[in-house]
Image (cartoon, helix red, strand yellow):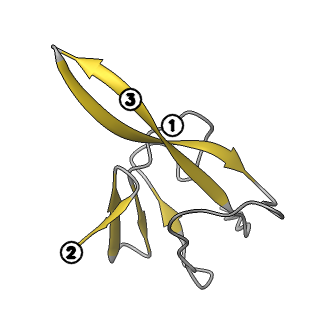
Amino acid sequence: MMVLKKLTNFAAQYKEELIEDQLFFNAYFVEIGELEGYYGHFEYDAKEAEYKDNEDGFPKLNQKADFYLENSIKFVNGLIKK
């Protein structure tokens, strides 16, 4: 089985969502690919770490920003969990 590896960049943006009368700020992927000219409040250099998620292992537009880097760094709602 051939494994495809690709270096990419992605940006997450928070959306306000009203869920059961409570306001939540949830992070979703809004851009994927070359992000030349984009700047974020928080930027993380993954140093070519492998991206993993509970879907198919590649970020998709409008997907919630919950993922892992190298199985050791966990991101939940776009933020690193320790």
Rounded to the nearest angstrom, the CA distance separating label 2 from label 1 is: 22 Å
Callout 3 amino acid: Glu
Instruction: Identify the image quadrant of the N terminus.
Output: bottom right
Sooner in the amino-acid sequence: mark 1 or mark 3: 3
Residue nearer the viewer, 41 or 70: 41
> Which residue position holds label 2?
82
Q: Residue at x 35, y 61 (%)?
A: 79
Sooner in the amino-acid sequence: mark 2 or mark 3: 3
Q: Is residue 16 left or right of residue 23?
A: right
> Which residue position holds label 3?
16
Callout 1 amino acid: Gln
Instruction: Identify the image quadrant of the C terminus.
Output: bottom left
Tell me if label 2 and label 3 are in contact, CB under 8 Å.
no
For this orientation, the residue located farthest to the bottom is 47
> Which residue position holds label 1?
63
Callout 2 amino acid: Lys
Sort mark 2 into few (<14), some (14-19) or many (20+) by Cα contacts within 10 Å: few
- The image quadrant that residue 68 belongs to is bottom left
Would you place residue 64 above or below residue 37 in this image? Answer: above
Tell me if label 2 and label 1 are in contact, CB under 8 Å.
no
Picture coordinates of residue 52 (x, y %)? Answer: 47, 60
For this orientation, the residue located farthest to the top is 20
Q: Residue at x 33, y 38 (%)?
A: 25
Picture coordinates of residue 70 (x, y %)? Answer: 44, 76
Would you place residue 30 above or below residue 46 in this image? Answer: above
Judged from the image, the secondary structure of the residue bearing numbered disc 2 is loop
Would you place residue 3 above or below residue 58 in this image? Answer: below
Which numbered mark, 2 or 3, is in the foreground of this view?
A: 3
Rounded to the nearest angstrom, the CA distance separating label 1 from label 3 is: 15 Å
Tell me if label 1 and label 3 are in contact, CB under 8 Å.
no
Q: Is residue 42 left or right of residue 7?
A: left
